[in-house]
Image (cartoon, helix red, strand yellow):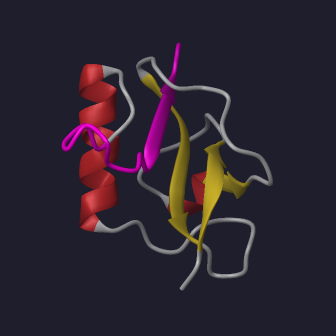
Amino acid sequence: MSKSWFAYTGIGSVILPENYLLSNDLPACRDGFTVCAIYADNIGLEFPGILSENMRRYIANGLTNGVPEPRVPFEAFKYVYMRPA
């Protein structure tokens, strides 16, 4: 299954797929304490598939530390980007 960037709408729970919209662009955001965008399974709709346990953990960590996730290892691809509130 392919993955795509999805922007958080800013409305509702950050762990519900229907609160994200497919984005054709890479996120311009990076750091902050609000979810900006996630790189998740593209199921062919405007929103991602079910968010995995790892994705939910990355979102929780990002909300706590304000930086893209995962942080370790440092060079790892980032699946969650944050933005200022």
In this rendering, the answer to whether 14 lies above or below 22 is above
| Residue range (magenta) | 70-85
Asked whether 44 or 28 is in front, the reply is: 28
Asked whether 45 or 24 is in front, the reply is: 24
81 left or right of 65 in image:
right
67 left or right of 28 in image:
left
Membership of 73 in magenta stretch: yes
> What residue do we see at 26% from left, 60% from top?
54
Q: Quarter-wise, where is residue 33 in the image? A: top left
The image position of residue 10, as x and y in percent, is 61, 34
> What residue do we see at 19% from left, 42% from top?
72
The quadrant the N terminus occupies is: bottom right
The image position of residue 77, as x and y in percent, is 40, 50
Q: Of all residues shown, which one is farthest toward the top?
A: 85
| Residue 51 appears in view | yes
81 left or right of 55 in image:
right
| Residue 14 appears in view | no
> What residue do we see at 24% from left, 36% from top?
61
Q: Of all residues shown, which one is farthest toward the right?
A: 24
In this rendering, the answer to whether 50 lies above or below 39 is below
Q: Quarter-wise, where is residue 37 in the image? A: top right
